[in-house]
Image (cartoon, rainbow, N blue to C red):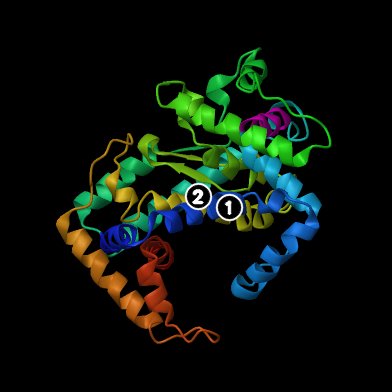
Amino acid sequence: MEYLQKLQTILSTTESQTINDYLMWKLLSSFNSYLPQRYRIPHETISTLLKGQTIKPLWEECINEVIERFPIPMITIYNRLFNGGRYSKIEKSDIQKIIEDLKEALSQIILNIDWMDEETRAAANEKLKHLKVNFNILENFQTSTFENEIMTQFNGLKLIGNTYFENTISIRKFSQKNEFKKLNSSNYLNNFSSLTFEAFIELIPFNLYQNNEIILPTSLLQFPFYVLNAPNSINYGSIGAIISRELTHNFDDYGSNFGETGSRKNWWKEDTIKFFDSKKQCFIAQYNNKADIISGKKVGNFCQVLSRKARTCFFEKMF
């Protein structure tokens, strides 16, 4: 609220031409990365000095551009590989056993932690029993014409070889029009943001709290996260660690807002909330004694600013 109040003051006291110039510059600068290298050097040099960002090679930028602009076709390719290609040799029962073992371990931990009252503990176990972990985000859409249906969403988009900048303009215009169309659409795929689909390509698990479901990208089912026929210690220590971390999010003070069916309800009792908050403050105080070597900032202060990060740090320690 303080930010919006100050912004209102700036907007009301700044000349309209200055605001217009700023908005135009922000628009133009957003296309900087699509210009030839000689035009990008000044901006990249400033970013390197101010933010420590390193300049990515052009091939990597091209790959990232495809992932960002075409996440849905990319995830369908991963999905196809999992069901009939390079991942077809993986026994899904092996993956399921890892998931079930981790859920059982979490169940035992819930039984032994000291900061939950018995009613909250029972609710946690009930939620864990109904929790789904799924590697196949698109299993609800598998039809013989599914990929064709995906591609029809790009009807009208024209791309021409060797015209990178012009293609970028076309893609942005097309994407924006699609975003406006979603406002009046009930299509399930449209309800997933591009960021959601991009997450699966970037090896980022996604938690659907409203479904009490964790969806893991099929791209995790490859080296070094999962190794076919490797000892359990390898796979449990790699992909198992990733799944475990995501499991705990369903039982932290954010996951406590969603019940066993994903309905919006807080299943933590008041005593548990107070006990949790008191332990969280002890955790923050402990890290306040540690400072970053370069900036000198206290780690605890950083966690307080990033409350979600504080929950993550603390909750993993609690478990």
Q: Quadrant of residue 9?
A: bottom left
Dot 2, how many residues are within 10 Å of its Cα: few (below 14), some (14-19), or many (20+)? some
Going by the picture, which residue comes out furthest to the top?
A: 144
Horizontal and vertical percent for residue 60? 76, 52
Query: Is residue 57 within the magenta segment?
Result: no
Residue at the spot x=60%, y=36% of the render? 172
Start-end of magenta stretch: 72-81
Q: Nearer the viewer, residue 279 or 76?
A: 76
* Picture residue at 35% right of the left edge, 52% below the top: 251
Residue 160 visible in rendering: yes
75 in magenta: yes
Position of 317 relative to 74 (above/below)? below
Instruction: State how far apart marks 1 and 2 are (Cα).
Output: 7 Å
Question: Which quadrant would residue 3 be assigned to in this image?
Answer: bottom left
Quarter placement of the C terminus = bottom left
Give the amino acid at mark 1.
Gly
Residue 70 in percent (x, y) is at 65, 34
The relative height of residue 173 versus residue 299 in the rendered view (above or below) is above
Quarter holding the N terminus is bottom left
Q: Is residue 176 above or below residue 220?
A: above
Categorize mark 1 by other alpha carbons within 10 Å: few (<14), some (14-19), many (20+).
Answer: many
Residue 48 position by quadrant: bottom right
Q: Main secondary structure of the magenta part?
A: helix
Residue 289 as seen in the image, left or right of residue 163: left
The image's mark for residue 102 is 2
Residue 141 picture location, percent across and down: 56, 20
Residue in the picture at 41% in, 74% down = 302
Left or right of residue 311, residue 141 in this image = right
Q: Which mark is residue 240?
A: 1
